[in-house]
Amino acid sequence: MIFRSAPKVSNDSLFPALVAVSLVVATLMSGCATHGGTSLVLTPSLQTVSSPISEDEAARLALANNPGFLELMDDLGIARAELIQAGELPNPGFSVLFPLGPKQLEFAARLPVESIWLRPHRVEIASKNVDAVSQRLVQDGLDLIREVKLACVDLRLAQRRVELAREEVELLERFTEVARARQEAGDISQLEVATAETDSLRSRIDRDRAPHVVKLAEAKLRNLMGLDPTEQGEISLKKAPGLPSLDRSNEAILEQAFAARPDLRAAEIALEVEGKRVGLAAKEIFQITAIFDSNGDGSNFEAGPGLDLTLPILHQNQGARALADAKFKKACHRYLSIRNQIALEVEQALVRYRQAERDLRRIRDELLPRLRDTIEQTERAWQGGEVSYLFVLESTRKAHAARVSEAEMMAEWRRAAAELERSSGSPSLLSMAREHIEP
């Protein structure tokens, strides 16, 4: 099975994530770091964070303080320790047989020679394993950035829904008052009034529930940023930046993803490591020990070198070789699996991104203007005595529902943007585009 090497990752594509990982290391060493005017401390409190914060600042806080990500950082230390272990040579052995009766004094020194011969191979494998762990750590950082951005989207949407819920309550209360007045005048039945009252009650329930959804979103974001869990303060976010229209082809973005995704690079390195372990298992069949032996009495000593060679008669290290072959095959399949998964994630993110952009444009450019015209027309008709005020309220209600759809579609677009940046392996993918649509 032949694999084409993935294109080299440019420094620009992975720079934000690599800087973030370096920031985490610096934070762990110093206990505190400052970036972009925001104080980063281990398990910081909400008061230590400048407010309001942007999505990028929240992501930096998460990379520096999220306990789960810091736990993953320890894998790099473990890999480096294994590299040190691979470079260590076994200590030589020394044995002494004391003279007793006719027995002569005898001593011998032993040194496993195969460890010297195999040391470069073991060090190379351990070194590449460190590279693989580093790439997986960068991917974990990109995953965390995605989760933080999604949490920010959920928080903004929850806060927007609080405002819209209050507007809906006011609208439906006016609608109910007009319905009651018309029922008293005998224009409509009690059933229609009951329907309006039910809608008003539902809107008040939604209004009362909306702040709790905000608290849940704040708790999730607070947890991701690694803030003090005992604090319950509000999190204020800066205005979200605009999003661009993608003018690049799906093939170009997919090619960039294959070049930039750290987990694919980690799988490629792991495949190379397992291939080298197959060769190492074959070389470990023979074990050779160098010996220097000396014996004699008080007046005459004899000394000379020798070898202790293990004869591969009963087994030829078949178990270790079969294990290495199986791990190599697994690494091959994992490489293909990750490559296919990347293609799927990029395609799904692009479809969601472009569909959400189209839907949002249609809501803003077609639906909302038409509803505004309808409201103006019904208001003029009501002022002229042609229609009831209920028609005005019904048009206003439809416009309010469209604004709710607009907020939800904007959130969906931002979720797709976060997924696209993560799936492409380039947090700067969308910021490099020219045209941006304001939220």
Image (cartoon, rainbow, N blue to C red):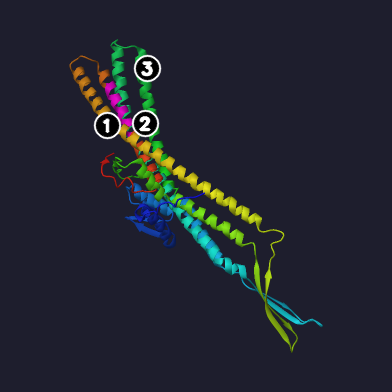
Where, by quadrant of the figure, is residue 189 drawn?
A: top left
* Near-viewer residue (178 or 357): 357
Where, by quadrant of the figure, is residue 41 drawn?
A: bottom left
x and y percent of residue 186 in the render? 30, 10
Q: Secondary structure at mark 1?
A: helix
* Near-viewer residue (352 or 194): 352
Kindly identify the residue that appears in the image at 25 percent across and 31 percent down.
Answer: 365
Crowding near pointer 3: few (<14 within 10 Å), some, many (20+)? Answer: some
- According to the image, label 3 marks what residue? 194
Q: CA distance from mark 2 to mark 1?
A: 25 Å
Crowding near pointer 2: few (<14 within 10 Å), some, many (20+)? Answer: many
Q: Which residues are magenta?
A: 393-407
In screen coordinates, is 56 left or right of 111? left
Where, by quadrant of the figure, is residue 28 drawn?
A: bottom left
When the figure is inspected, residue 375 is found, relative to residue 156, above or below; the finding is above
x and y percent of residue 40 in the render? 38, 55
Numbered circle sitting on residue 152: none
